[in-house]
Each structure stands twice: as C-alpha cells, then as structure tokens.
Image (spheres, grey):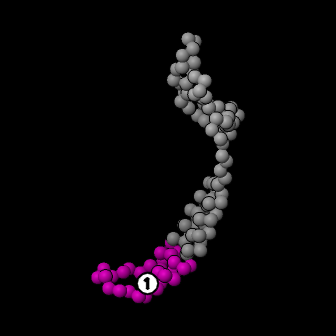
Amino acid sequence: MSFLIALIIELLRVFVPAAMSGAVRCSVDGARQPQLRDRLRARVRHVWPVVALLAAMASGCVRTVYVPPGEPVRLRETILNVKVWVMNEDGRAVAGRMDLPEGWYALPVNTNEE
C-alpha cells in the first residue's frame, strides 16, 4: 500500500506542475473567455484517463477478509501499549497496559457465559 501511495505522490509531482505551467491569469471582470474554456476542456480530456487508471489501481489493491463474529484471530504484528484487563490475585479485573506480541491469538469474550 505504501508503494501505491508513493507512486501516486510522484505522479502528482510530475503532472501538477506540468498542468500549471501553461496556466494563464484570468481577468476578474467575469467576461466569457472561450479560449480559456477550450484549453481547460482539452486539459481535462488528457488528464481524466490517468485519474481513472489511478483510481482503478487503488481500488484493486485492498483485499478484505471477513471474520465471523466470535471467531479467534492470530495477530500478524506486535501491537504496542494496548489497554487490557488483567486479573489480580483476588480474581478481579484490573485495567492495565501491555504489548501484544505477534503470533498471539485474540479471542472474543462470550457474554452469554458471564
């Protein structure tokens, strides 16, 4: 995903200055400027395929996996400084913080058994 973001940023760094290099200051009086309108339309016709291609590439790069409610999952990376509930020596839940290491399983609490 970071590669795709870097690619989009680099493409924008190339296309935005190129598109702005031919920009002409408009008059403020609000008069119709057919030449300016035609230049802008021509520029949009050349740019929209690139934008459509980037949007298509971005939408196809994400894969979603559905996990049904109540199913355990295994952590793929370490999660730092997570708020957790831990049991003290009296068996009572106490708020705390800890790192959850990669490879640990996360399980939902079954509220029906409590």
Q: Is residue 108 visible?
A: yes
Spot occupied by residue 106 in the image (x, y as percentages of width and height): 65, 32
* Identity of the residue drawn at 47% across and 75% down: 20
Which residue is the extreme one toward the front? 112
Which residue is the extreme one toward the bottom? 35
Query: Which quadrant of the figure contains the C terminus?
Result: top right
| Viewer-closest of 30 and 17 | 30
As drawn, 86 above or below 102: above
Spot occupied by residue 13 in the image (x, y as percentages of width and height): 54, 67
Residue 58 image-quadrant placement = bottom right
Spot occupied by residue 103 in the image (x, y as percentages of width and height): 70, 34
As drawn, 5 above or below 65: below
Spot occupied by residue 98 in the image (x, y as percentages of width and height): 58, 28
| Viewer-closest of 89 and 29 | 89
As drawn, 21 above or below 54: below
Q: Give, as a three-letter code, the residue at label 1.
A: Arg
Q: Secondary structure at mark 1?
A: helix
Main SS class of the magenta portion in the image: helix
As drawn, 87 above or below 97: above
The residue where tag 1 is placed is: 37
* Identity of the residue drawn at 64% across and 54% down: 62
Q: Which residues are magenta?
A: 17-46
Q: Is residue 102 visible?
A: no
